[in-house]
């Protein structure tokens, strides 16, 4: 927002009856009123110089000073119009106090709630007291849209060309987003006039790879890497007219740029010249010249008059003094730039007016306990190990005030503290997140276990802003693909407020408080692997948080029950309890008990599957002795058990057993005759008691096993003395997948054919079954889906089948019960590929759950959705 002086009218408007204001209580009712009947401004704020307070209106784009205590009625102000109230922090710099669509809200009440109750009646612009943040437990951020970047090249996203959104900025009116698209060497534009329905607005080619963007007035200042290689480095700052989508000027830079920031008063831009190292050269470690630096752009006047200055950062850090390799920059209200030197584990402060380094210090180290530092295969999340003296190696940084800033401690060479840190400008650590972010992502099923031996969730970036009187810190986790939101009303003790789902690999975070919006751009893109780069749009609203949809309670040791890759559901005896299972991504198979009476539902306990009675090794006499890639044989059995007594199944279905305990469907691995996928396990039905002890293992008929494909058992249901299982896809030489019926008394099998829908995704792929659940009277629901996600997803459906009178070899008919596409779109998200669990509760509601693949080529998002009654 421009803070230039504009013509204005005297007085400030009032907005409706004071009794409707959420910020006034009966005891606060002011006795004095203006002629319009509105509260007299002076009666509410007797010690405030009201002439210092300004308001701006989105529709008129004008600023209206309150140069009178009397808030007279302004008939030109329209109900529903957006308003922003600001006060000066220092000369030329303003702080937003309050913004909301006006629906009977009194501005004076807003100021009262914001804490502007004291100060000198004659105070100047340089002496405005700090306004404390106030927590608001009724307001949360919720995702309202997810814009796929590929839609810039075609609304249906049918191009497989890699694209990305890395860093995002917003136009001054907050209606247009500008993002960097490095793979395409473009910047893109998104119309967010309606944030719930973002629209592609075009793209603009750059002369190299855009790495960062920031907005100053009507221009997008875009850093572009034009380097020939790691030694011959160069770059430009492209000054882009946002409305015209043209380059107004290019400013040469002395190397490869990374981060860009613009001062709030519009006087300066700061550009980090990273000159990143070649990680494949030798050991990949610094120093590798040329050295990076900081460039200051003096931006007063029109772009053709802007000039640059260079700040030497060599000789500052102690690790690699000749190779600072600066990473990220942010500017505070005093025009002090904070710069992270990630590989050097160092932080530098630069006064932009003088261009001098005014402070510098090491980012320090941390000791972490109760984290996972081991990368097992199959995976296992064990929050029980430690690391000491870990360098923070910060990446993103944001100012919290003129004296404090926060860093995202991603790590690079040999660091990464898996959290964030708040520093004061003298280098003192005010707060460090320790292991709390690691535990938070594990609790919501977003822990990236394959990064356990590296840097865990890898916080990538941070953002700070005030929304309607409450200060928030946002932390983007690159590997966990979430944005953590912290209430900063107690500046020394950030309070976790919520976790937001993002696309895969969020890099940039942008707060737009005047529109109550938060933006997160996720850069990872691979159509082949089923995920696309997206720009996530969240709205600050008076509503309960919609994510996460499932969380876990603590284990006895105080760490959260880790979970992920949910692959099946079963209803409990009441609507309150649902049971879930995970697939073979994790070792140590277990059953989760989910309490649905909580919001969100909570995994309250885990039943670990064990084999103290030797049921797995007892399979040996029925299996071939020799190692054979085309059969499940004796040599495959040892991998199914672990030294701690746990077992490894690929559990893809669960059903509560009528005799107590559970039936589990374990999918076999491998395809007969396929060297790429040798057979390692068979498809098994496993009966366990209520404590998880294996009681019985049932195998498929030998003739069917001879046709095994790697798409096997995907669901199980017990009904009327029989077990009904679903194979995901047709096996060798067959047209349809089979529905198997096992008679528990007779111990016999019969199989029917299930007619799959044909694939209709523009990306091709296949269609298969992923779950079966019983309705009674020989009726069952099945989940049928394609293997496509996001814009390519087409088939996510629930069908009903009836097995009454069906004989071995019959082909079944099916009736569509629910198309799930709209249900999966409802959270404002990229459509998740794998709907893997379905349970019908005793009361009739149907629950579905999605599989996040343990975050392997996956954002980690899990949707646990109540569909209501679908019969």
Image (cartoon, helix red, strand yellow):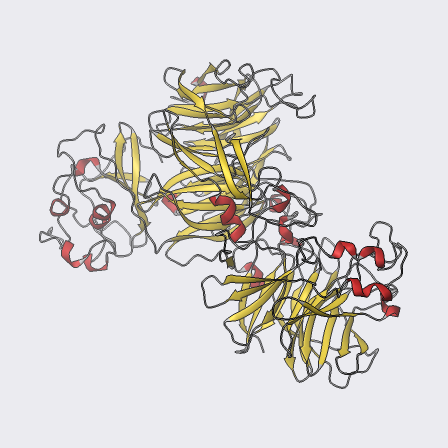
In the figure, 471 relative to 779: above or below? above
Question: Against 711, is 86 above or below?
Answer: above
Horizontal relation, residue 430 to residue 822: left or right: left
| Image-quadrant location for residue 685 | bottom right
Residue 191 in percent (x, y) is at 49, 45
Q: Quadrant of the N terminus?
A: top left
Q: Is residue 82 visible?
A: no
The answer, for residue 689, to whether it is visible in the render is yes
* Image quarter (top left, top right, bottom left or bottom right) of the C terminus: bottom right
Query: Residue pushed farthest left?
Result: 32
**709 lies left or right of 815:** right
Q: Is 351 situated left or right of 815 in this image?
A: left
Q: Position of residue 755 (x, y in %)?
A: 77, 71
- Choose between 160 and 675: the one closer to the eye: 675
- Where residue 670 sits, quadrant-wise, is bottom right
Residue at image x 65%, y 68%?
Answer: 654
Across and down, in percent, residue 690 comes to 61, 70
Image side of residue 155 versus residue 45, left or right: right
User: Who is closer to the viewer here, 558 or 347?
Assistant: 558
Q: How many marks?
A: 0
Give above or below for 99 relative to 621. Answer: above
Residue 263 pos. (x, y %): 39, 27
Q: Residue furthest front?
A: 613
- Name the residue located 88 percent from the left edge and 54 percent from the top edge: 627
């Amino acid at each position: 927002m421009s803070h230039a002086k504009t013509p204005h009218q005297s007085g400030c408007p009032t907005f409706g009856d004071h009794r409707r204001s959420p910020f006034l209580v009966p005891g606060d009712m002011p006795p004095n009123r203006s002629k319009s009947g509105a509260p007299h401004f002076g009666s509410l704020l007797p010690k405030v110089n009201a002439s210092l307070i300004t308001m701006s209106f989105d529709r008129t784009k004008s600023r209206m000073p309150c140069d009178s205590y009397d808030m007279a009625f302004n008939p030109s102000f329209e109900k529903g119009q957006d308003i922003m109230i600001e006060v000066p922090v220092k000369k030329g710099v303003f702080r937003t106090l309050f913004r909301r669509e006006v629906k009977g809200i009194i501005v004076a009440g807003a100021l009262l709630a914001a804490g502007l109750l004291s100060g000198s009646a004659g105070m100047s612009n340089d002496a405005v007291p700090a306004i404390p943040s106030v927590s608001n437990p009724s307001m949360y951020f919720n995702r309202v849209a997810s814009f796929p970047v590929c839609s810039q090249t075609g609304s249906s996203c049918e191009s497989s060309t890699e694209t990305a959104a890395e860093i995002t900025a917003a136009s001054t009116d907050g209606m247009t987003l500008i993002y960097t698209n490095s793979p395409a060497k473009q910047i893109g534009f998104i119309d967010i006039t309606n944030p719930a329905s973002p629209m592609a607005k075009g793209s603009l080619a750059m002369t190299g790879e855009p790495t960062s963007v920031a907005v100053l007035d009507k221009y997008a200042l875009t850093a572009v890497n034009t380097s020939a290689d790691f030694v011959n480095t160069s770059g430009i700052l492209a000054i882009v007219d946002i409305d015209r989508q043209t380059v107004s000027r290019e400013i040469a830079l002395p190397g490869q740029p990374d981060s860009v920031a613009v001062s709030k008063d519009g006087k300066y831009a700061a550009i980090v010249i990273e000159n990143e190292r070649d990680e494949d050269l030798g050991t990949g470690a610094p120093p590798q010249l040329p050295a990076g630096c900081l460039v200051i752009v003096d931006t007063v006047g029109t772009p053709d008059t802007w000039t640059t200055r260079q700040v030497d950062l060599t000789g500052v850090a102690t690790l690699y003094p000749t190779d600072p390799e600066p990473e990220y920059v942010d500017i505070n209200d005093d025009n002090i730039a904070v710069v992270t030197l990630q590989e050097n584990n160092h932080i530098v402060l630069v006064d932009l007016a003088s261009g001098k380094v005014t402070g510098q210090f090491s980012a320090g180290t941390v000791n972490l306990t109760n984290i996972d530092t081991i990368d097992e295969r199959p995976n296992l999340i064990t929050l029980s190990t430690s690391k000491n003296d870990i360098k923070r190696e910060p990446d993103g940084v944001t100012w919290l005030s003129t004296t404090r800033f926060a860093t995202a401690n991603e790590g690079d060479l040999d660091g990464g503290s898996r959290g964030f840190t708040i520093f004061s400008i003298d280098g003192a650590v005010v707060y460090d997140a320790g292991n709390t972010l690691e535990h938070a992502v594990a609790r919501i099923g977003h822990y990236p276990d394959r990064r356990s031996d590296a840097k865990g969730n890898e916080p990538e970036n941070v953002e700070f802003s005030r929304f309607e009187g409450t200060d928030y810190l946002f932390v983007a986790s690159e590997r966990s693909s979430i944005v953590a939101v912290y209430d900063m009303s107690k500046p020394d003790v950030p309070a976790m407020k919520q976790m937001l789902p993002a696309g895969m690999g969020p890099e940039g975070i942008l707060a737009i408080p005047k529109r109550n919006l938060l933006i997160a751009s996720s850069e990872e893109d691979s159509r082949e692997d089923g995920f696309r780069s997206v720009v996530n749009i969240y709205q600050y609203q008076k509503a309960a948080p919609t994510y996460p949809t499932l969380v876990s309670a603590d284990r006895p040791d105080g760490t959260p029950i880790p979970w992920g890759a949910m692959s099946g559901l079963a209803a409990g005896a009441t609507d309150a309890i649902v049971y879930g299972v995970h697939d073979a991504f994790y070792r140590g198979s277990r059953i989760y008990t989910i309490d649905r009476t909580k919001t969100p539902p909570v995994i309250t306990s885990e039943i670990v599957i064990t084999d103290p009675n030797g049921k797995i090794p007892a399979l040996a006499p029925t299996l071939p002795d020799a190692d054979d890639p085309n059969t499940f044989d004796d040599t495959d059995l040892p991998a199914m058990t672990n030294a701690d007594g746990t077992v490894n199944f690929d559990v893809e279905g669960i059903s509560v057993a009528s005799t107590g305990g559970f039936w589990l469907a374990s999918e076999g691995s491998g395809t007969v005759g396929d060297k790429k996928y040798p057979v390692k396990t068979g498809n098994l039905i496993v009966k366990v008691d209520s404590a998880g002890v294996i009681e019985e293992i049932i195998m498929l008929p030998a003739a069917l096993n001879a046709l095994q494909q790697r798409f096997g058992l995907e669901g199980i249901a017990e009904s009327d003395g029989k077990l009904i299982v679903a194979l995901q896809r047709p096996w060798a030489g067959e047209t349809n997948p089979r529905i198997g019926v096992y008679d528990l008394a007779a111990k016999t099998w019969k199989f029917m054919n299930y007619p799959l829908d044909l694939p209709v995704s523009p990306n091709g792929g296949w269609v298969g079954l992923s779950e079966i659940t019983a309705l009674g009277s020989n009726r069952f629901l099945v989940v049928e889906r394609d293997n496509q996600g996001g814009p390519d997803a087409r088939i996510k459906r629930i069908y009903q089948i009836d097995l009454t009178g069906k004989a071995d070899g019959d082909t079944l008919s099916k009736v569509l019960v629910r198309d799930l596409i709209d249900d999966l779109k409802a959270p404002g998200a990229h459509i998740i590929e794998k709907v893997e669990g379905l349970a019908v509760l005793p009361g009739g509601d149907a629950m579905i759950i999605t599989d996040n693949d343990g975050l392997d080529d996956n954002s980690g998002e899990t949707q646990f959705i109540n569909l209501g009654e679908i019969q």
